[in-house]
Image (tube, rainbow, N blue to C red):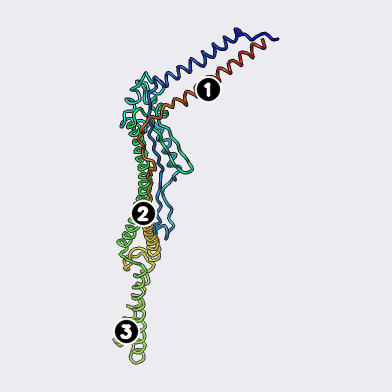
Amino acid sequence: MAAAARVQRRHWGLALSFAALVLVPLALVIFYLWGLAVERYDSSAGFTVRQEHNTSSADILGGLAQFSGGGIASDGDILYAFIQSQEMVAAVDAQADLRAHYTQHWPRDFVFALWPDATLEDLLWYWRRVVRLSYDSASGLTEVQVLAYDPDIAQKIARAVVAESEARINALSEQAREDAMRYARGDVAEALERLGAAREALTGFRTRTRIVDPAVDIQSRMGVMNNLQQQLAEALIASDMLRGTTRDNDPRLINARQRIDVIRERIAIERQTFASDNTDTGAVGEDYPNLIAEYETLNVNREFAEQTYRAALTALEAAREDAARNSRYLAVYIKPTLAESAQYPRRWILTGLAGLFLVLVWSIGALIYYSIRDRG
Protein backbone atom coordinates (compact mmCIF):
# COMPACT_ATOMS: atom_id res chain seq x y z
CA MET A 1 0.00 0.00 0.00
CA ALA A 2 1.13 3.54 -0.76
CA ALA A 3 2.21 5.71 2.11
CA ALA A 4 -0.18 8.38 3.28
CA ALA A 5 0.28 11.78 1.64
CA ARG A 6 2.08 14.30 3.74
CA VAL A 7 2.33 18.01 3.42
CA GLN A 8 5.67 18.78 1.87
CA ARG A 9 7.75 21.87 2.25
CA ARG A 10 6.91 23.00 -1.24
CA HIS A 11 3.21 22.79 -0.38
CA TRP A 12 3.69 25.21 2.48
CA GLY A 13 5.57 27.52 0.14
CA LEU A 14 2.74 27.35 -2.39
CA ALA A 15 0.17 28.11 0.30
CA LEU A 16 2.20 31.00 1.59
CA SER A 17 2.63 32.40 -1.91
CA PHE A 18 -1.13 32.12 -2.46
CA ALA A 19 -1.77 34.01 0.76
CA ALA A 20 0.84 36.66 -0.07
CA LEU A 21 -0.08 37.14 -3.73
CA VAL A 22 -3.83 36.58 -3.65
CA LEU A 23 -5.41 36.74 -0.20
CA VAL A 24 -3.53 39.73 1.19
CA PRO A 25 -3.92 41.94 -1.95
CA LEU A 26 -7.55 40.89 -2.25
CA ALA A 27 -8.12 41.78 1.41
CA LEU A 28 -6.56 45.20 0.78
CA VAL A 29 -8.80 45.70 -2.25
CA ILE A 30 -11.86 44.72 -0.21
CA PHE A 31 -10.78 46.99 2.65
CA TYR A 32 -10.32 49.90 0.23
CA LEU A 33 -13.58 49.33 -1.66
CA TRP A 34 -15.74 48.85 1.44
CA GLY A 35 -13.88 51.01 3.90
CA LEU A 36 -12.18 53.88 2.06
CA ALA A 37 -13.76 54.35 -1.37
CA VAL A 38 -16.43 57.05 -1.34
CA GLU A 39 -19.68 56.38 -3.13
CA ARG A 40 -20.15 58.16 -6.43
CA TYR A 41 -23.33 59.09 -8.28
CA ASP A 42 -23.85 59.24 -12.01
CA SER A 43 -25.86 61.56 -14.24
CA SER A 44 -26.57 60.64 -17.86
CA ALA A 45 -27.54 62.82 -20.82
CA GLY A 46 -28.12 62.06 -24.48
CA PHE A 47 -28.26 64.38 -27.47
CA THR A 48 -27.75 64.60 -31.19
CA VAL A 49 -27.33 67.33 -33.77
CA ARG A 50 -30.33 67.97 -35.99
CA GLN A 51 -30.52 70.07 -39.13
CA GLU A 52 -33.73 71.30 -40.71
CA HIS A 53 -34.11 71.48 -44.49
CA ASN A 54 -37.16 73.35 -45.74
CA THR A 55 -37.75 73.55 -49.48
CA SER A 56 -37.82 77.12 -50.72
CA SER A 57 -39.10 78.66 -53.93
CA ALA A 58 -35.57 79.67 -54.87
CA ASP A 59 -34.45 76.03 -54.75
CA ILE A 60 -37.42 74.92 -56.87
CA LEU A 61 -36.90 77.57 -59.55
CA GLY A 62 -33.15 77.87 -59.60
CA GLY A 63 -31.80 74.70 -58.07
CA LEU A 64 -29.50 76.67 -55.83
CA ALA A 65 -27.02 74.66 -53.80
CA GLN A 66 -27.05 74.77 -50.06
CA PHE A 67 -24.15 76.51 -48.40
CA SER A 68 -24.01 74.61 -45.14
CA GLY A 69 -21.23 72.09 -44.78
CA GLY A 70 -21.00 68.97 -42.71
CA GLY A 71 -23.88 66.73 -41.76
CA ILE A 72 -24.98 65.18 -38.52
CA ALA A 73 -22.05 62.76 -38.42
CA SER A 74 -19.41 65.46 -38.77
CA ASP A 75 -21.11 67.60 -36.13
CA GLY A 76 -21.19 64.59 -33.82
CA ASP A 77 -17.48 64.02 -34.41
CA ILE A 78 -16.82 67.63 -33.55
CA LEU A 79 -18.79 67.39 -30.31
CA TYR A 80 -17.12 64.09 -29.41
CA ALA A 81 -13.71 65.74 -29.63
CA PHE A 82 -14.90 68.98 -28.04
CA ILE A 83 -16.33 67.30 -24.92
CA GLN A 84 -12.94 65.67 -24.28
CA SER A 85 -10.99 68.86 -24.93
CA GLN A 86 -9.23 71.18 -22.50
CA GLU A 87 -11.57 73.99 -23.51
CA MET A 88 -14.60 72.03 -22.29
CA VAL A 89 -12.83 71.14 -19.01
CA ALA A 90 -11.97 74.79 -18.39
CA ALA A 91 -15.52 75.93 -19.15
CA VAL A 92 -17.14 73.34 -16.87
CA ASP A 93 -14.54 73.98 -14.15
CA ALA A 94 -15.50 77.65 -14.16
CA GLN A 95 -19.15 76.68 -13.56
CA ALA A 96 -18.89 73.68 -11.19
CA ASP A 97 -15.41 74.07 -9.57
CA LEU A 98 -14.23 70.59 -10.48
CA ARG A 99 -11.04 70.76 -8.42
CA ALA A 100 -12.88 71.58 -5.20
CA HIS A 101 -15.35 68.75 -5.66
CA TYR A 102 -13.09 65.94 -6.81
CA THR A 103 -10.24 66.68 -4.35
CA GLN A 104 -12.42 66.81 -1.22
CA HIS A 105 -11.86 63.10 -0.39
CA TRP A 106 -8.14 63.05 -1.01
CA PRO A 107 -6.11 61.19 0.29
CA ARG A 108 -8.70 58.81 1.73
CA ASP A 109 -10.11 57.86 -1.68
CA PHE A 110 -6.70 57.95 -3.34
CA VAL A 111 -7.72 55.79 -6.33
CA PHE A 112 -10.84 57.63 -7.48
CA ALA A 113 -10.18 61.13 -6.10
CA LEU A 114 -8.14 63.95 -7.65
CA TRP A 115 -5.02 65.20 -5.92
CA PRO A 116 -5.18 68.82 -4.71
CA ASP A 117 -2.25 70.27 -6.67
CA ALA A 118 -3.50 68.96 -10.03
CA THR A 119 -2.77 71.13 -13.06
CA LEU A 120 -5.17 71.76 -15.90
CA GLU A 121 -3.55 68.93 -17.85
CA ASP A 122 -4.03 66.61 -14.86
CA LEU A 123 -7.63 67.73 -14.62
CA LEU A 124 -8.10 66.93 -18.30
CA TRP A 125 -6.75 63.40 -17.70
CA TYR A 126 -9.04 62.98 -14.70
CA TRP A 127 -11.99 64.42 -16.69
CA ARG A 128 -11.78 61.52 -19.11
CA ARG A 129 -12.09 59.13 -16.14
CA VAL A 130 -15.24 60.68 -14.66
CA VAL A 131 -16.92 61.72 -17.93
CA ARG A 132 -17.67 58.74 -20.12
CA LEU A 133 -18.73 59.23 -23.73
CA SER A 134 -20.65 56.94 -26.04
CA TYR A 135 -20.98 58.06 -29.66
CA ASP A 136 -22.60 56.28 -32.60
CA SER A 137 -21.28 57.75 -35.84
CA ALA A 138 -24.00 56.04 -37.90
CA SER A 139 -26.95 57.60 -36.07
CA GLY A 140 -25.15 60.61 -34.62
CA LEU A 141 -26.37 59.83 -31.08
CA THR A 142 -24.10 60.90 -28.23
CA GLU A 143 -24.52 59.86 -24.60
CA VAL A 144 -22.60 61.34 -21.68
CA GLN A 145 -22.26 59.80 -18.22
CA VAL A 146 -20.81 61.95 -15.43
CA LEU A 147 -19.58 60.54 -12.12
CA ALA A 148 -19.41 62.71 -9.00
CA TYR A 149 -19.51 62.41 -5.22
CA ASP A 150 -22.79 64.33 -5.07
CA PRO A 151 -25.84 63.66 -7.30
CA ASP A 152 -26.57 67.37 -7.70
CA ILE A 153 -23.00 68.07 -8.76
CA ALA A 154 -23.11 65.20 -11.25
CA GLN A 155 -26.31 66.62 -12.76
CA LYS A 156 -24.82 70.13 -12.78
CA ILE A 157 -21.75 68.94 -14.66
CA ALA A 158 -23.90 67.03 -17.16
CA ARG A 159 -26.02 70.15 -17.73
CA ALA A 160 -22.87 72.20 -18.24
CA VAL A 161 -21.61 69.70 -20.83
CA VAL A 162 -24.93 69.86 -22.70
CA ALA A 163 -25.01 73.68 -22.52
CA GLU A 164 -21.43 74.06 -23.79
CA SER A 165 -22.10 71.56 -26.59
CA GLU A 166 -25.22 73.47 -27.61
CA ALA A 167 -23.30 76.75 -27.57
CA ARG A 168 -20.59 75.25 -29.78
CA ILE A 169 -23.12 73.93 -32.31
CA ASN A 170 -24.87 77.32 -32.38
CA ALA A 171 -21.51 79.02 -32.92
CA LEU A 172 -20.65 76.68 -35.80
CA SER A 173 -24.06 77.24 -37.38
CA GLU A 174 -23.78 81.00 -36.97
CA GLN A 175 -20.29 80.95 -38.44
CA ALA A 176 -21.53 79.02 -41.48
CA ARG A 177 -24.34 81.53 -41.99
CA GLU A 178 -22.01 84.49 -41.57
CA ASP A 179 -19.50 83.02 -44.04
CA ALA A 180 -22.20 82.49 -46.65
CA MET A 181 -23.62 85.98 -46.15
CA ARG A 182 -20.16 87.57 -46.14
CA TYR A 183 -19.20 85.95 -49.44
CA ALA A 184 -22.55 86.92 -50.99
CA ARG A 185 -22.22 90.52 -49.77
CA GLY A 186 -18.68 90.66 -51.13
CA ASP A 187 -19.91 89.53 -54.56
CA VAL A 188 -22.67 92.17 -54.49
CA ALA A 189 -20.22 94.91 -53.53
CA GLU A 190 -17.81 93.87 -56.29
CA ALA A 191 -20.61 93.71 -58.88
CA LEU A 192 -21.93 97.11 -57.76
CA GLU A 193 -18.48 98.64 -58.09
CA ARG A 194 -18.11 97.18 -61.59
CA LEU A 195 -21.56 98.50 -62.56
CA GLY A 196 -20.72 101.96 -61.23
CA ALA A 197 -17.47 102.02 -63.21
CA ALA A 198 -19.28 100.96 -66.41
CA ARG A 199 -21.96 103.60 -65.98
CA GLU A 200 -19.36 106.25 -65.18
CA ALA A 201 -17.42 105.37 -68.34
CA LEU A 202 -20.60 105.62 -70.41
CA THR A 203 -21.45 108.99 -68.83
CA GLY A 204 -17.95 110.24 -69.58
CA PHE A 205 -18.36 109.24 -73.21
CA ARG A 206 -21.65 111.13 -73.47
CA THR A 207 -20.16 114.20 -71.77
CA ARG A 208 -17.13 114.20 -74.04
CA THR A 209 -18.97 113.63 -77.31
CA ARG A 210 -22.24 115.36 -76.39
CA ILE A 211 -23.99 112.33 -77.89
CA VAL A 212 -26.48 110.41 -75.80
CA ASP A 213 -26.88 107.52 -78.24
CA PRO A 214 -24.87 107.34 -81.49
CA ALA A 215 -27.58 105.20 -83.09
CA VAL A 216 -30.23 107.87 -82.44
CA ASP A 217 -27.82 110.63 -83.40
CA ILE A 218 -26.94 109.01 -86.71
CA GLN A 219 -30.63 108.53 -87.48
CA SER A 220 -31.19 112.26 -86.93
CA ARG A 221 -28.21 113.06 -89.13
CA MET A 222 -29.51 110.74 -91.82
CA GLY A 223 -32.82 112.57 -91.56
CA VAL A 224 -31.02 115.84 -92.20
CA MET A 225 -29.19 114.27 -95.15
CA ASN A 226 -32.42 112.95 -96.62
CA ASN A 227 -34.02 116.36 -96.24
CA LEU A 228 -31.07 118.04 -97.97
CA GLN A 229 -31.15 115.48 -100.76
CA GLN A 230 -34.84 116.18 -101.24
CA GLN A 231 -34.23 119.96 -101.28
CA LEU A 232 -31.39 119.45 -103.76
CA ALA A 233 -33.63 117.48 -106.07
CA GLU A 234 -36.32 120.16 -105.88
CA ALA A 235 -33.75 122.92 -106.54
CA LEU A 236 -32.37 121.04 -109.56
CA ILE A 237 -35.85 120.60 -110.99
CA ALA A 238 -36.63 124.27 -110.48
CA SER A 239 -33.31 125.26 -112.11
CA ASP A 240 -33.99 123.04 -115.11
CA MET A 241 -37.42 124.58 -115.55
CA LEU A 242 -36.03 128.12 -115.41
CA ARG A 243 -33.18 127.29 -117.81
CA GLY A 244 -35.69 126.41 -120.54
CA THR A 245 -37.72 129.57 -120.25
CA THR A 246 -35.25 132.29 -119.28
CA ARG A 247 -31.85 133.59 -120.16
CA ASP A 248 -28.64 132.68 -118.38
CA ASN A 249 -28.37 136.06 -116.67
CA ASP A 250 -31.84 135.86 -115.28
CA PRO A 251 -31.72 136.63 -111.50
CA ARG A 252 -34.07 133.76 -110.76
CA LEU A 253 -31.77 131.28 -112.48
CA ILE A 254 -28.76 132.72 -110.66
CA ASN A 255 -30.54 132.35 -107.32
CA ALA A 256 -31.50 128.80 -108.20
CA ARG A 257 -27.90 127.93 -108.99
CA GLN A 258 -26.71 129.55 -105.77
CA ARG A 259 -29.29 127.54 -103.83
CA ILE A 260 -28.07 124.32 -105.48
CA ASP A 261 -24.44 125.13 -104.61
CA VAL A 262 -25.32 125.89 -100.99
CA ILE A 263 -27.30 122.66 -100.61
CA ARG A 264 -24.50 120.63 -102.17
CA GLU A 265 -21.93 122.24 -99.89
CA ARG A 266 -24.09 121.49 -96.84
CA ILE A 267 -24.49 117.89 -97.98
CA ALA A 268 -20.72 117.60 -98.33
CA ILE A 269 -20.23 119.04 -94.85
CA GLU A 270 -22.77 116.64 -93.34
CA ARG A 271 -21.10 113.69 -95.04
CA GLN A 272 -17.74 114.82 -93.81
CA THR A 273 -18.94 114.83 -90.20
CA PHE A 274 -19.51 111.05 -90.36
CA ALA A 275 -15.82 110.23 -90.89
CA SER A 276 -13.83 113.36 -90.20
CA ASP A 277 -12.02 114.70 -87.15
CA ASN A 278 -12.30 118.32 -88.33
CA THR A 279 -14.09 120.20 -85.56
CA ASP A 280 -14.43 123.25 -87.81
CA THR A 281 -17.00 121.40 -89.89
CA GLY A 282 -19.23 120.81 -86.87
CA ALA A 283 -18.09 117.29 -86.02
CA VAL A 284 -17.35 116.29 -82.47
CA GLY A 285 -13.62 115.88 -83.00
CA GLU A 286 -13.56 112.11 -83.61
CA ASP A 287 -14.55 109.98 -86.56
CA TYR A 288 -18.04 108.54 -86.23
CA PRO A 289 -17.21 104.84 -86.77
CA ASN A 290 -14.77 104.89 -83.84
CA LEU A 291 -17.36 106.69 -81.72
CA ILE A 292 -19.95 104.02 -82.50
CA ALA A 293 -17.46 101.21 -81.73
CA GLU A 294 -16.48 102.84 -78.44
CA TYR A 295 -20.12 103.37 -77.48
CA GLU A 296 -21.02 99.76 -78.26
CA THR A 297 -18.11 98.51 -76.12
CA LEU A 298 -19.12 100.72 -73.21
CA ASN A 299 -22.75 99.71 -73.57
CA VAL A 300 -21.89 96.00 -73.62
CA ASN A 301 -19.77 96.45 -70.48
CA ARG A 302 -22.65 98.22 -68.77
CA GLU A 303 -25.15 95.49 -69.70
CA PHE A 304 -22.76 92.76 -68.52
CA ALA A 305 -22.20 94.63 -65.23
CA GLU A 306 -25.97 94.94 -64.75
CA GLN A 307 -26.46 91.20 -65.33
CA THR A 308 -23.63 90.39 -62.92
CA TYR A 309 -25.15 92.68 -60.32
CA ARG A 310 -28.58 91.08 -60.69
CA ALA A 311 -27.02 87.61 -60.35
CA ALA A 312 -25.15 88.72 -57.21
CA LEU A 313 -28.36 90.08 -55.71
CA THR A 314 -30.09 86.78 -56.46
CA ALA A 315 -27.27 84.85 -54.80
CA LEU A 316 -27.44 87.16 -51.77
CA GLU A 317 -31.17 86.60 -51.44
CA ALA A 318 -30.67 82.84 -51.78
CA ALA A 319 -27.98 82.92 -49.06
CA ARG A 320 -30.30 84.94 -46.83
CA GLU A 321 -33.10 82.39 -47.34
CA ASP A 322 -30.73 79.51 -46.61
CA ALA A 323 -29.50 81.24 -43.47
CA ALA A 324 -33.09 81.71 -42.32
CA ARG A 325 -34.44 78.23 -43.04
CA ASN A 326 -31.37 75.97 -42.56
CA SER A 327 -30.52 75.73 -38.89
CA ARG A 328 -28.56 73.21 -36.86
CA TYR A 329 -29.45 72.69 -33.25
CA LEU A 330 -28.74 70.31 -30.39
CA ALA A 331 -31.64 67.94 -29.79
CA VAL A 332 -31.48 66.56 -26.23
CA TYR A 333 -33.33 63.25 -26.07
CA ILE A 334 -32.13 62.42 -22.52
CA LYS A 335 -32.04 65.34 -20.13
CA PRO A 336 -29.36 65.20 -17.40
CA THR A 337 -30.64 62.76 -14.82
CA LEU A 338 -30.54 63.06 -11.03
CA ALA A 339 -29.44 59.86 -9.26
CA GLU A 340 -31.22 58.64 -6.12
CA SER A 341 -28.63 56.06 -5.10
CA ALA A 342 -24.92 55.61 -5.65
CA GLN A 343 -23.97 53.08 -8.31
CA TYR A 344 -20.20 53.48 -8.08
CA PRO A 345 -17.80 52.09 -7.20
CA ARG A 346 -19.19 48.73 -8.19
CA ARG A 347 -17.63 46.87 -5.29
CA TRP A 348 -18.72 43.31 -6.10
CA ILE A 349 -17.64 43.57 -9.72
CA LEU A 350 -14.30 45.16 -8.85
CA THR A 351 -13.72 42.61 -6.09
CA GLY A 352 -14.46 39.72 -8.43
CA LEU A 353 -12.21 41.14 -11.16
CA ALA A 354 -9.42 41.76 -8.68
CA GLY A 355 -9.70 38.25 -7.29
CA LEU A 356 -9.73 36.73 -10.76
CA PHE A 357 -6.70 38.75 -11.83
CA LEU A 358 -4.75 37.88 -8.68
CA VAL A 359 -5.55 34.16 -9.01
CA LEU A 360 -4.46 34.21 -12.66
CA VAL A 361 -1.21 35.95 -11.80
CA TRP A 362 -0.51 33.53 -8.94
CA SER A 363 -1.37 30.49 -11.09
CA ILE A 364 0.88 31.59 -13.92
CA GLY A 365 3.68 32.28 -11.48
CA ALA A 366 3.27 28.85 -9.85
CA LEU A 367 3.26 27.09 -13.22
CA ILE A 368 6.40 28.90 -14.27
CA TYR A 369 8.12 28.03 -10.98
CA TYR A 370 7.30 24.32 -11.17
CA SER A 371 8.23 24.18 -14.83
CA ILE A 372 11.67 25.58 -14.08
CA ARG A 373 12.02 23.35 -11.00
CA ASP A 374 11.14 20.18 -12.91
CA ARG A 375 13.64 20.98 -15.66
CA GLY A 376 16.33 21.61 -13.11
Which comes sooner in the sequence, label 2 or label 1? 2
Q: Amino acid at mark 2?
A: Glu
| Near-viewer residue (69 or 185) | 69
Q: On residue 200, which mark appears?
A: none
Between the C-alphas of marks 2 and 3, the distance is: 77 Å
Image depth: mark 2 or mark 3 in front:
2
Which comes sooner in the sequence, label 2 or label 3? 3
Q: Which residue is mark 3?
A: 256
Which residue is the extreme one toward the bottom?
245
Horizontal placement of 275 versus 250: left or right? right
Q: Which residue is mark 2?
A: 321
Q: On residue 356, which mark appears?
A: 1
Q: Amino acid at mark 1?
A: Leu
Location of the C terminus by quadrant is: top right
Q: Amino acid at mark 3?
A: Ala
The 10 Å Cα crowd at callout 2, few under 14, some 14 to 19, many 20 or more, is some
Q: Picture quarter containing residue 225?
A: bottom left
Which comes sooner in the sequence, label 1 or label 3? 3
